[in-house]
Image: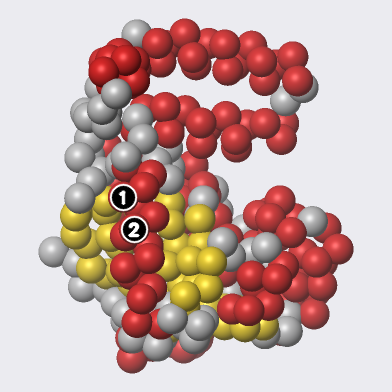
Amino acid sequence: MYTTILWEVREHTGILTLNRPDRLNALDTEMREEIADAVHKAEYDPEVWTLIVTGAGRGFCSGADLKARAQAESAGGGNSITTQPMFDVQYYYPIAFGELSKPVIAAVNGVTRGAGNNMAFSADFRIASEQANFGCNFVERGLMAEASAYYLPRLVGMAIATEICLLGEPFDAAQAKAWGIVNKVVPHDKLMDEAMALARKINSKAPIAVRMTKQALHRAHDQSAEQFLDMQNTMNTKLRYTADAKEALAAFIEKRPAKFQNK
């Protein structure tokens, strides 16, 4: 069905693999559209509770496919990527990752530049292979740091985000861990095992409660304490009437693991 990505659902986890290894998974228009379609599937499939994003080959994502962009411009077609509405999530996929109601795990397997950072930084969790390396090199291309400039200050604070975005210098997985960008660095051959283990751990919780908690975390930045308490009150009132909340209470009383059904 797809030509630039791979998509599968395993154990309530959607696995989206960028699949242009010969181009280090550089993004062209087709890949962006296919990513958007897969994210749409992840959002609306009740069997998908968590999403993992990774790359095939040596790269997670090396950024936009500049060769394809140059060819389009030289052919007089303009830039088929940036002529789309900037905040239409069909094309501006990092916003789609951030806005996806379900947790997103970036399993960063290798080279990550430009738009690849946008995807990784907008995920809820980042697990990096020891071979992963990052570089927010937009300014070297005459551009600004897109979604990276939005997500990085929230991850690492303004001082480090400024250093990363304005200098554009590459950094490895160990430095990413030291800065707090990635949650964990693992041996390369264990990356997907670790990502799936994390997905299973998330999926062992009540899925609706997980989604509402993610929503609350994302909204907290823009609300007063009073607004936030009102919101969480409304959310918890709704959650108390879900089948999963009733199952959690029954499991606690009966001293057994809960069996959640996303209901």
Q: Quadrant of residue 34?
A: bottom left
Q: Secondary structure at mark 1?
A: helix
Q: Which residue is mark 2?
A: 197
Towards the viewer: 154 or 192:
192
Q: Residue at x 77, y 64 (%)?
A: 161
- Residue 220 is left or right of residue 68, and the answer is right
Towards the viewer: 232 or 186:
186
Farthest residue, direction left: 1
Image: 100 above or below 61: above
Q: Which residue is mark 1?
A: 200
Q: Residue at x 36, y 35 (%)?
A: 205
- The image position of residue 214, as x and y in percent, is 51, 36
Q: What coloring was used for the rendering?
A: secondary structure
Q: In the rendered structure, which amino acid carries the disc numbered 1?
A: Arg
- Would you say the residues marked 2 and 1 are in contact, meaning their CB atoms lie under 8 Å apart? yes
Label placed on residue 67: none
Q: Secondary structure at mark 2?
A: helix
Q: Residue at x 42, y 67 (%)?
A: 107
Q: Is residue 158 visible?
A: yes
Q: Residue at x 41, y 82 (%)?
A: 188
Q: In the rendered structure, which amino acid carries the disc numbered 2?
A: Ala
